[in-house]
Image (cartoon, rainbow, N blue to C red):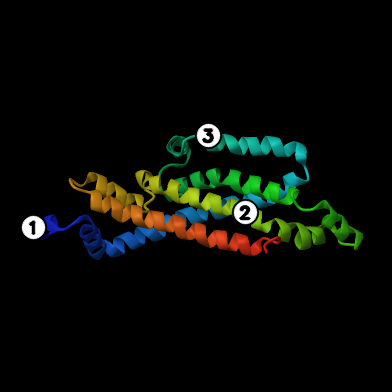
Amino acid sequence: MTGLTQMNLWEKILWYYDINGVYVWEQFLQHLLLSFYGVILAAIIAVPLGFYLARHHKLAQWIIQLASLIQIVPSIALMTLLMFLFGLGPNLVILTIFLYSLLPILSNTYTGVMNVDQNVINAGKGMGMTRNQVLFNIEIPLSLSIIISGIRSAFVMAIGVATIGAFVGAGGLGMVLIRGMRASDGTAIILAAVIPIALLSIVSDIMLSFVEKRLNPYRA
């Protein structure tokens, strides 16, 4: 114990990883899965809905504003409201992430489809393309980078929301944060949680940004 008190902050963080590496890794994976499942579920709903709204403009304003209202509610408050309906645990966090992810994915999909050059669509139709061929050969490829941009924003946001999942029994790196807050001198433990959370956000943002640029049909 005397040796621990003589360590500097970075040495204490490394010591914590050495002693609790398996536990931190398990919480890291749980954190990643909570974020991933919430965003993927939102994408399954929001991407087709975005394409549908691009063909039904009158509905678009209402639906997107409805999704915007969810963003206004603080994540803790939304999670508390949902807790009364769905109880505690990982499903509550996934549902919260799902709801928060709808707006960026939906609005980006809608914008991406609306920004597809109408002349290109007309040219495709002039060549005899069916509606599905226009969708899969023109609209989806030309709007995909903007859709990925929305998924990228949603995923970075999801990592932050998943952090508070520990307070409702969902696990994740928030559990390590709670340990640090409860310890008498928990700065090193808190940083041991914050560092992988930050790294997860940065790495996922860089990777999705790379994918977004690669899919941009107008890239140089």
| Amino acid type of the residue tagged 3 in the rendering | Ile
Residue 112 on image: x %, y %: 70, 51
Q: From mark 2 to mark 1, how far is it between C-alphas?
A: 54 Å
Q: Amino acid at mark 1?
A: Thr
Quadrant the N terminus occupies: bottom left
Mark 2 to mark 3: distance in Å? Answer: 23 Å
Contact, mark 3 vs mark 1 (Cβ under 8 Å)? no
Callout 3: helix, strand or loop? helix
Identify residue for label 1. Answer: 2
Which residue: 77% across, 63% down? 137
Residue at the image point whose x is 34% and y is 62% from the top: 25
19 in relation to 76, above or below: below
Q: Which residue is mark 2?
A: 44
* Residue on which the image places disc 3: 72
Q: Quadrant of residue 209?
A: bottom right
> Which of pointers 2 and 1 indicates the residue nearer the eye?
1
Quick one: which residue is furthest to the front in this view? Answer: 220
Element at label 2: helix
Residue 213 is situated, as x and y percent measured from the top left of the image, at 61, 61
In-front residue for pair 76/207:
207
Instruction: Report the residue at 55% width, 37% height from top.
Output: 70
Relative to 69, is 219 on the left or the right? right
SS under mark 1: helix
* Labels 2 and 1: the sequence-earlier one: 1
Question: What amino acid does circle 2 point to?
Answer: Ile
Name which quarter of the figure residue 200 lies in: bottom left
Q: Which mark, residue 138?
A: none
Observer-side mark, 2 or 3, equals 3
Residue 208 at x, y = what percent? 55, 60
